[in-house]
Image: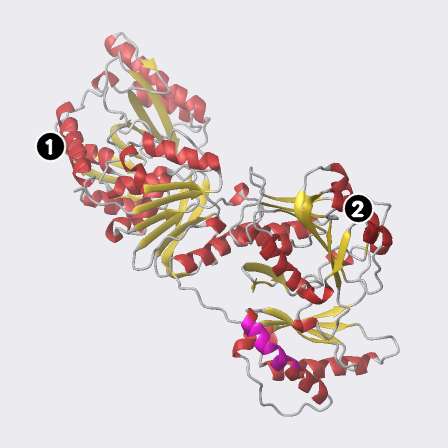
């Protein structure tokens, strides 16, 4: 019989990556002289030490005590590991450990490079224990895999097999509160480790936020730590049926833990926020908090269905905050690009709401975590089951206030560029003219020059602090060498006037696009940047495709949609990268629906939404994306919309509609179908950049049609009034 004071050997196992933190924890519980191995700590201590670890360890997986070692003799050539394990189990009197009336189970761990069928080997260990009992006392214990009274942990090694009593029973990460699960939850002991690493207890924040709370694990583990609640207080253990169990000692440790928890409950707690975009997750969090015994503090926890784009005012000024979350990653979200957009969006929100506060965020890949704006970031690699995860923690960088480029730009002093004087003067004049408007309206993306002079046939667009320069293909009668020289002079002048370096200038040649070439990559170097337009953050690609992902001439109509969308169901046909839908969503639209044939652009659309904290592919279908021909899509559905935007291509190869789409030929049919989906008091905006386009008389006769082109063209396109035309179409009022 063991006593509380006798020293014995103990193994404490943990997930890979937790060894150092676990050692600190055990030392805090009075354990000394700890040896550290991958996934396991070993020490000599008392039974009280072992019980205290079972009760208090937030990080450990199992507490084991070795009871028998079977040393191997290599007298034979071929090893039969399963029979070795049987022999080792048979050669020990298990009746010294537990009574034959007790139920038991065997868990087997096999060291690397050992070849054996684990199921069969586990069965042979069980056979050895049963046969040992029959030989010793003539009775055999029963097997109970689900809830055994005794668990034997066997380690199959190269030179010896070790048989341990598992004092923990079920893994210690199973606290007993997680009744309701969501997809890919974080293990409880890993959640505790992350909170411990980020020093939750030392910081004792005023605000604790998990914006993607899943089943509420972080919330509950934080509550347990802040209320000094022992994780083993209300769960079963594997020592109750053990002959060496000291019941009185265990009950005294349990009584002490209960008392500590009751005392700590009197202390003030942070204001907790638990949000998730999924209503099922919100329900699971609430139910798990109650199951964990924290019903009395529910009024201090704001549990709500919210997207990242729908955060409340936390009134965090002058308060300390602690933010921790496990975003949907890997297979749970889809492609890597969307993942990156999610982390970028989350990072921007943290910067805005919680500058200089502590944050810890889980990622499936280091590249995702790299985009988080944290000071002195620390990275911890852990195994969540078989899935590696990376935890990035640190203090949130304050947001850098991004002003429009033209606000800080001043006319540059530079030597005259021979052959490009007129171009340089015109570009500088344009920038001076646009500066006041851009600063007042907070315009970050605009056209600075558009083939103003016949000899310099280029378009110069500003995207944030980068330039996108399009060279229109020169007529065939122009000498190519002369055209090339002139373009190089233009680039020299652009750098001189703007003050921007080569790395901030991106060049494309624009020729007439045919067939599918509009979707064809122009270069192999993907350089995507985030730009600001109104409330929206938008991903632009300045290298890969001819179009950047943002049509600058439609800026005014997008901002108009943002103002008009609140509470309305919005439909965007030929949605491209769905920037109009994004503006509608951020403007408070009840729903957005985006339809485009290109999956490339629809995936880009989803990234734009995720970047702004909006959910996609969600059960509530608030924001939907359809890869479809717009005609077919209109024909098949019946939903009604209060606001519709249509900006069709001039010409397209659509296999689903007469083989081709021609805007002049087909707009009558398109608009009639779209108006069938518009509510009686709704508004449809139709835009077209085909200069010779004429609206069909039948549309003018059937509906109220108002041309609003002038209202939709910004000052940066005033010189080129034919950049597009736009109409507002409504149902007649009578």
Q: Is residue 58 magenta?
A: no
Question: What percent of the width, then of the height, locates residue 700?
Answer: 82, 54
Question: What percent of the width, then of the height, locates residue 577?
Answer: 65, 55
Instruction: Magenta stretch: give its range.
Output: 430-440
Question: What percent of the width, then of the height, locates residue 317?
Answer: 33, 59
Furthest residue in direction left, as rendered = 5
Which of these two is toward me, 343 or 42? 343
- The residue sitting at 82% across, 75% down in the picture is 474
Q: How is the image coloured?
A: secondary structure
Residue carrying label 2: 672
Q: Quadrant of the N terminus?
A: top left
Residue carrying label 1: 5
Secondary structure type for disc 2: helix
Q: Kindly indicate the quadrant of the structure image that contains residue 526.
A: bottom right
Q: Quick check: 176 left or right of 693?
A: left
Give above or below for 342 relative to 256.
below
Which of these two is toward me, 171 or 514? 514
Question: Which is in the foreground here, disc 1 or disc 2?
Answer: 2
How far separated are the C-alphas under marks 1 and 2? 88 Å
Secondary structure type for disc 1: loop
Q: Which secondary structure is most common in the magenta stretch?
A: helix
Give above or below for 130 relative to 711.
above
Q: Quick check: 141 left or right of 695?
A: left
Which of these two is toward me, 363 or 537? 537
Question: What percent of the width, then of the height, locates residue 98?
Answer: 23, 18
Which is more N-terminal, label 2 or label 1?
1
Furthest residue in direction top, as rendered = 138
Q: Residues within 10 Å of mark 1 (few under 14, many from 20)?
A: few
Q: How many marks?
A: 2
The circle drawn on residue 229 is none
Q: Quick check: 494 left or right of 213?
A: right
Q: Quick check: 253 left or right of 544?
A: left
């Amino acid at each position: 019989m063991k006593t509380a004071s006798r020293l014995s050997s103990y193994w404490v196992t943990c997930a890979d990556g937790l060894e150092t933190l676990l050692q600190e924890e055990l030392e805090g519980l009075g354990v000394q002289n700890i040896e550290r191995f991958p996934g396991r700590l070993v020490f000599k201590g008392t039974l009280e030490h072992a019980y205290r670890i079972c009760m208090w360890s937030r990080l450990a997986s199992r507490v084991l005590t070795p009871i028998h070692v079977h040393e191997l003799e290599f007298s034979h050539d071929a090893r039969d590991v399963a029979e070795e394990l049987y022999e080792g189990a048979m050669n020990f009197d298990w009746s010294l450990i537990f009574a034959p009336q007790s139920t038991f189970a065997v868990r087997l761990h096999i060291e690397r490079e050992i070849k054996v069928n684990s199921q069969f080997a586990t069965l042979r260990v069980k056979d050895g224990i049963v046969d040992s009992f029959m030989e010793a006392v003539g009775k055999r214990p029963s097997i109970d895999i689900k809830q055994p009274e005794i668990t034997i942990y066997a380690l199959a090694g190269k030179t010896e097999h070790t048989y341990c009593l598992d004092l923990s029973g079920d893994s210690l990460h199973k606290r007993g509160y997680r009744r309701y699960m969501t997809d890919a939850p974080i293990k409880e002991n890993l959640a505790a480790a992350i909170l411990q690493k980020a020093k939750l207890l030392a910081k004792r924040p005023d605000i604790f936020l998990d914006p993607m709370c899943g089943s509420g694990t972080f919330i509950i583990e934080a509550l347990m730590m802040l209320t000094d609640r022992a994780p083993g207080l209300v769960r079963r253990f594997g020592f109750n049926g053990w002959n060496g169990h000291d019941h009185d000692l265990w009950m005294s440790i349990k009584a002490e833990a209960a008392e500590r928890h009751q005392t700590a409950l009197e202390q003030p707690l942070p204001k907790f926020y638990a949000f998730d975009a999924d209503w099922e997750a919100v329900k699971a969090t609430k139910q798990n908090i109650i199951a964990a015994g924290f019903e009395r503090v529910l009024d201090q926890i704001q549990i709500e269905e919210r997207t990242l784009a729908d955060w409340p005012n936390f009134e965090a000024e002058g308060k300390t905050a602690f933010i921790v979350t496990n975003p949907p990653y890997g297979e749970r979200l889809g492609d890597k690009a969307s993942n990156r957009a999610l982390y970028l969006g989350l990072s921007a929100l943290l910067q805005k709401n919680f500058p200089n506060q502590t944050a810890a965020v889980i990622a499936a890949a280091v590249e995702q975590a790299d985009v988080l704006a944290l000071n002195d970031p620390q990275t911890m690699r852990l195994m969540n089951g078989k899935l590696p995860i990376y935890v990035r923690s640190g203090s949130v960088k304050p947001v850098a206030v991004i002003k429009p480029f033209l606000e800080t730009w001043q006319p540059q002093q530079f030597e005259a560029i021979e052959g490009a004087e007129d171009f340089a003067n015109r570009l500088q004049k344009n920038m001076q003219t646009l500066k006041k408007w851009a600063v007042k309206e907070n315009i970050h993306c605009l056209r600075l020059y558009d083939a103003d002079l016949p000899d310099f046939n280029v378009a110069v667009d500003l995207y944030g602090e980068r330039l996108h320069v399009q060279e229109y293909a020169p007529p065939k009668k122009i000498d190519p060498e002369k055209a090339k020289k002139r373009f190089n002079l233009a680039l020299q002048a652009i750098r001189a006037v703007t003050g921007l370096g080569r790395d901030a200038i991106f060049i494309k040649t624009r020729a007439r696009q045919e067939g599918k070439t509009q979707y064809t990559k122009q270069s192999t170097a993907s350089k995507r940047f985030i730009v600001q337009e109104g409330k929206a953050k938008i991903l632009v690609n300045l290298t890969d495709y001819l179009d950047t992902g943002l049509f600058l001439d439609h800026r005014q109509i997008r901002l108009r949609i943002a103002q008009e969308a609140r509470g309305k169901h919005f439909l965007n046909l030929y949605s491209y990268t769905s920037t109009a839908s994004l503006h509608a969503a951020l403007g408070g639209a009840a729903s957005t629906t985006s339809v485009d044939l290109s999956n490339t652009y629809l995936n880009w659309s989803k990234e734009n939404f995720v970047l702004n904290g909006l959910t996609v592919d969600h059960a509530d279908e608030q924001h939907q994306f359809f890869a479809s021909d717009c005609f077919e899509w209109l024909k098949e559905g019946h939903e009604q919309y209060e606001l519709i935007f249509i900006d069709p291509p001039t010409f397209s190869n659509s296999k689903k509609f007469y083989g081709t789409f021609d805007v002049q030929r087909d707009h009558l049919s398109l608009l009639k179908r779209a108006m069938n989906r518009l509510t009686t008091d709704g508004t449809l905006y139709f835009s077209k950049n085909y200069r010779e386009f004429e609206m069909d008389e039948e549309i003018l006769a059937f509906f109220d049609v108002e041309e609003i082109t002038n209202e939709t063209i910004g000052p940066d396109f005033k010189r080129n009034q034919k950049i597009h035309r736009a109409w507002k179409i409504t149902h007649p009022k009578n």
